Amino acid sequence: MSNPKSFYMSVWRWHFYAGLYTIPFLIMLAVTGLLMLYSPVVEKWTNQDLYQVEQVSQSPITYSAQKSLVAQAYPGDVIKSIHSPRNPNNSTRFQVMHNGDALTVFVDPYQAKILGELSISDSLYAWADDTHGTFMIGDTGDKMIEIAVSFTILLVITGIYLWWPESGKTLKEALSITANKGRTFWRDLHSVIGAWISVILLFFCVSGLAWASVWGGSMLQAWSTFPMQKSASSVSSTITHESLNVPGLKQIPWGLEQSLLPESEKTKATHQISLDSIIKQSQALGFTQFQVFFPSGDTGVYTTSASSMSKDIENATDDRTVHFDQYSGKILADVGYAEYSLAAKSMAVGISLHMGQWGIWNYIVNTLFCLSILLISITGVVMWWMRRPQGKMLLAAPQKPKNLTRWKQATWLLLPVSFLFPLAAAAIVAVLILDRIVLFISPKTRALFD
């Protein structure tokens, strides 16, 4: 006859091991997430002399003239793009690649002068973003974080099972903290917060994994990328939309990053049409707040983009990217949210919510969520510390059931994670192998895991 207590202990043991690996990453992700949420706000507030112009007049210089000012100040550097001012009292922003560093250069169009620059690549946001995505150790860190986020989904599944109300206990009671002291209080705080944020946590995990290299880049994003070659008559064989991003900042919609860029038609024309002409065409198409990326090379294109990724707009369903021939101004491709695949649509909305792009309510929810993650991580550590034997160097994992069948049966809860996320599956297998190895090592060493 089955023993529910034995199965409960098996699930708890899986929950413990997953948390052991995941908690340091969750703390890091919550802290860097808060930094990424608020650092742009702080940057604008502390640099109002760059983002705002002193005096507005009726005769600003042309966008082409503003670009020439930047070219003169940064000779030999590549000017990547221009942000159209949101309001008349805003400066015009150009992105410039300078000695491998991406800069934002601010121009006052009324006084025809450069106000200053800010580094994009060396900003607090860029540091937090790099840490958030790769732990600042490149592809290895990216994979470690992907495993941690995948394991977080496992934590939610096992955590909900452990929290689920016992017979005779109402859902309202289960969602309330009843104890006021001791380990029971910390357990209630941990489980109740986990239950309240479980759905949001799953959402953040899936939308965050969209950027991960294996599940996101190699699988989901690759399958969901917009097929530009079906829209434009000529596309590059190697250059993708991702090349429009600058170091330290993602600006291109997720569903277009791996999509190939169109190419301008090779004609006898030798001169680009003016930037002002492209901006006028873009405004005629309905763009209000947007960014224009400049052509790269003889076959490059002008690209006008309004997306929540670049913070031009708040609503991801208004995403739109238009490519223009650099010589004739002809529209080569016009891709909006409606043309995205189902996965790309979901990720466009999901990522913008993940990044807090939907207004003040989104900021509040994301802030509370990050603080909840910090609290749930701390309570998990406190519970472990209170439960472990005093004065002994033990891992103090939940006791393994004597009936190992239960330990194996608990892995059924892991199947959804294993099927969807390859790195999580590999890590789960590694845990199972390690657990079997522990059975054969010396009793003294094995005791460390008890």
Image (cartoon, rainbow, N blue to C red):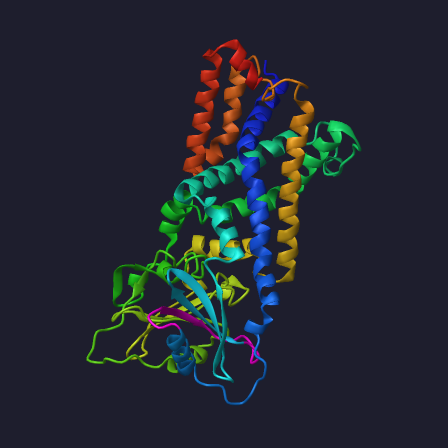
The residue under the point 48% across, 80% down is 113
Residue 78 counted in the magenta span: yes
In this view, 139 is above or below 302: above
Depth order, front residue of 212/73: 73
Identify the main secondary structure in magenta. Answer: loop
Residue 198 counted in the magenta span: no
Q: Where is residue 342 in the image (x, y as percent from the top left)?
A: 44, 54
The residue under the point 65% across, 38% down is 376
Q: Position of residue 388 (x, y in %)?
A: 65, 22
Q: Is residue 164 visible?
A: no
Q: Position of residue 1 (x, y in %)?
A: 59, 13
In this picture, residue 361 sits left or right of residue 114 = right
In this view, 198 is above or below 21: below
Work out which residue is located at the far bottom of the displayed protein and give it: 58
In this picture, residue 428 sits left or right of residue 189 = left
Task: Give the quadrant of residue 357.
Answer: bottom right
Tally the numbered discs.
Answer: 0
The C terminus - image quarter: top right
Q: Where is residue 449 in the image (x, y as percent from the top left)?
A: 55, 19
In this picture, residue 258 sits left or right of residue 410 = left
Task: Give the quadrant of residue 260.
Answer: bottom left
In this view, 194 is above or below 315: above
The residue under the point 58% across, 28% down is 16
Work out which residue is located at the far left of the displayed protein and give it: 268
The residue under the point 66% across, 18% down is 391
The magenta segment is 74-90
In this view, 444 is above or below 211: above
Depth order, front residue of 353/168: 353
Q: Can residue 54 be seen in this view?
A: yes
